[in-house]
Amino acid sequence: MTTFDKREEGFEKRFALDEEQKFKAQARGTRLLGLWAAEKLGITGDAANTYAKEVVAADFEEAGPGDVIRKLLRDFGAKGVEVTEQAIRTKMDELLAQAAEAVKAGK
């Protein structure tokens, strides 16, 4: 194996690791957002964890955060909870940053 091949393999491994960490952080951040939303909706205990899983599942409907935001806005509206789209986006960004740090730290 040449030096070039070794470098290429190293870059490929690093890329795969970065993508895996990004995926884990996204899923963890979305789960945390689901728990935050559950609290606002008055959902507690096991039901809150189940709701957070539903929010994570909603994230797989399409690329980007739109599917999750629409779900949360629908759920908040159904329960009469006043939360703006911007508030959801702000919380989403905050929780994604926390999740990314946790994944980087190996937690």
Image (spheres, rainbow, N blue to C red):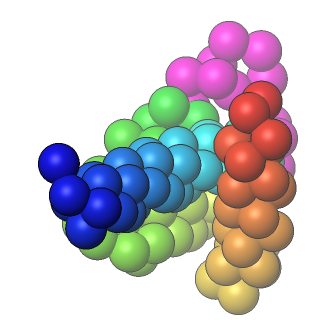
Identify the residue at the far top of this view.
46
Tell me the quarter of the picture where residue 64 sits: bottom left
Give the answer, above or below, for where 25 lies relative to 53. below
**Whole-percent x, y for residue 3 in the image:** 30, 61
Residue in view at x 53 percent, y 49 percent:
21
Which contiguous range is marked in magenta? Answer: 37-51
Characterize the magenta stretch by its predominant secondary structure. helix
Residue 70 % position (x, y): 44, 70
- At a point 67% along the width and 78% down the height, the residue shown is 89
Residue occupying the point 45% across, 36% down: 54
In this rendering, position of residue 31 left or right of residue 100: left
Q: Is residue 53 magenta?
A: no
The quadrant in which the C terminus is found is top right
Residue drawn at (68%, 12%) of the image: 46
- Image location of residue 97, percent across then percent down: 76, 64
Q: Which image quarter: residue 10?
A: bottom left
**Left or right, 48 with reference to 75:** right
Q: Is residue 105 visible?
A: yes
Decide: is 48 above or below 92: above
